[in-house]
Amino acid sequence: MLIKGKSKNKSKNKNSNRSWLELPEELWENILMRLATIERLLIAQKVCTTWSRVLNEPFMWHVIDMANCRGLTNSHVFPYVCHDAVNRSQGELVDIRLTFYATKELLVYVAER
């Protein structure tokens, strides 16, 4: 049904020119921190350069939770993914949660970093 008169889409048109990329970086950090570690490592960093840049910041990796690896189907990949997360923390890791995939070698690697 077509309604004559003032357009209700004026406010919609005003905001349609805004880009999601113009959001403050703090907001992107907040959004990305809500993703599981495995999702940040395997998916989110590939979305765009903004997400990749934010996910390269060490503070994004203060907490690494590898206990819920629903996106990781191959257990042989687990140590490599965990190494990547630990390396991204650049020595600022505060808390890490691992699953039964964790090996003695992996624990030593985490402790040394």
Image (tube, rainbow, N blue to C red):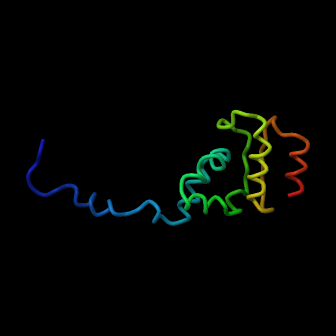
Residue at image position (67%, 58%) is 60
Horizontal and vertical percent position of residue 77: 75, 40
Horizontal and vertical percent position of residue 113: 85, 58
Residue at image position (91%, 49%) is 108
Q: Is residue 4 left or right of residue 15?
A: left
Horizontal and vertical percent position of residue 49: 56, 60
Front-most of residues 79 and 11: 79
User: Could you tell me which quadrant the N terminus lies in?
Assistant: top left
Q: Is residue 50 left or right of residue 85?
A: left
Horizontal and vertical percent position of residue 109: 87, 51
Residue at image position (59%, 59%) is 29
Q: Is residue 32 left or right of residue 23?
A: right
Above or below, 68 against 26 in this view is above
Residue at image position (67%, 44%) is 38
Above or below, 76 against 2 in this view is above
Q: Is residue 48 left or right of residue 4?
A: right
Above or below, 57 against 75 in this view is below
Above or below, 41 against 99 in this view is below
Q: Quadrant of residue 52?
A: bottom right
